[in-house]
Image: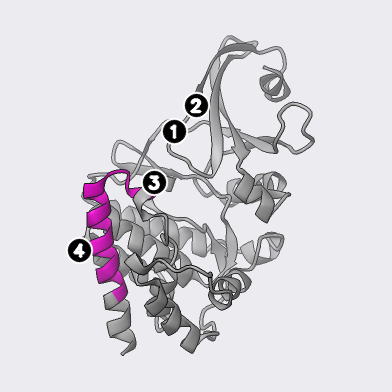
Amino acid sequence: MKIAQKIVPNSRLLRTWELKGGVSAQVTAIEIERPDHQIQTIVVRQHGSIDLARNPQIAADEYKLLQYLESAGLNSPKPYYFDQSGKLLSTPYIVIEYIDGEAGPQAAPDFSRQFAHQLARIHQLTHATTELSFLPQQAEIADNNIYKRPEKLDTTLNEELIRNTLERAWPRPQQNPSVLLHGDFWPGNTLWKNGRLIATIDWEDAQIGDPLVDLANSRLEILWSLGRDAMQKFTQQYQALTTLSYSNLPYWDLYSALKPAFKLAEWAGDEKQEEKMRKEHQWFVEQALKKLS
């Protein structure tokens, strides 16, 4: 209730509930009655231990990022407040707008077009790299992930083959200007209503770097969610909206293919879905290797 009072003084708490779907943060919705008797819902996001270890200032950084996105006119949650003092909650948190929508993927016939347009819109935000200079540099993250090989590799996902290929070719010269990256742009981080994409959420992984990094991640996620044809259609529609060099895309596809190492069973949720995701992951790696050969 104290958090709600900071956002809307003299408001009355009606109810709270946990919002499902996220794995990196604890997300709680708070419904309040304003002094003018209007009902408003706000969202409290408490960042998890992994994100906090990576960036103790993550609440402040995400708040500033959402402020920038609001000023740039991108459809994302409006930020209201952040607190990393530990006085009200034990971990840093931000308070943001509640947006009533359903997470993708959607059955809308133009899903790929809207999804591609939103990603291109993020990558084309003017002045993002200067105004958001506090965000991590994706190139440094990639170097660290590739050069510091884990002691144990996921043999079920051909991690050694992927890493061998990337290590031989690294570092890759960046051929595109650095842009704002969402960092985890997949259908589950978009909200939809009446067949329309209304918001992009969960910006805690935002970085500055080559737009192909976001594209590759999205390609794999759409492959898992909607299949190979949808992945190719999304890629073509994104390419039609941008003027980039795509010669390094197979390398970033392979880089994205490292992400689910030792996590795929957890992400899949059941054996049937896991089997499907492993099959498509293998195809995704093979298509990238084929392009490189």
Residues marked 3 and 4 touching at CB (< 8 Å) = no
The one of 49 and 252 positioned closer to us in this rendering: 49
Q: Amino acid at mark 3?
A: Gly
Reading the chain from its start, which is encountered first: label 3 or label 4? 3
Instruction: Find disc 1 in the rendering and name its residue.
Output: 20
Q: Quadrant of the C terminus?
A: bottom left
**Element at label 4:** helix
Asked if disc 2 and disc 3 are in contact, CB closer than 8 Å, the reply is no
Residue 61 appears in view: no
Residue under label 3: 188
Left or right, residue 150 beside residue 87: left
Q: Categorize mark 1 by other alpha carbons within 10 Å: few (<14), some (14-19), many (20+).
A: few
Q: Give the amino acid at mark 4.
A: Asp
**Residue receiving disc 2:** 18
- Kindly identify the residue that appears in the image at 58 percent across and 38 percent down: 78
Alpha carbon separation for disc pair 4 and 1: 29 Å
Q: Residue furthest front?
A: 152
Amino acid found under the numbered disc labelled 1: Lys
Q: Earlier in the sequence, mark 4 or mark 1?
A: 1
Residue 210, image x, y percentages: 52, 73
Q: CA distance from mark 3 to mark 4?
A: 19 Å
Residue 281 in which image quadrant: bottom left
Q: Is residue 243 above or below residue 227?
A: below
As drawn, 210 above or below 107: below
| Magenta stretch, residue numbers | 266-285
User: Upstream in the sequence, badge 2 or badge 3?
Assistant: 2
The CA span between labels 2 and 1 is 6 Å
Residue at mark 1 to residue at mark 3: CA–CA distance: 11 Å
Residue 60 image position (x, y, % from top left)? 72, 46
Which residue is located at x 59 percent, y 62 percent?
207
* Residue position marked by numbered label 4 in the rendering: 229
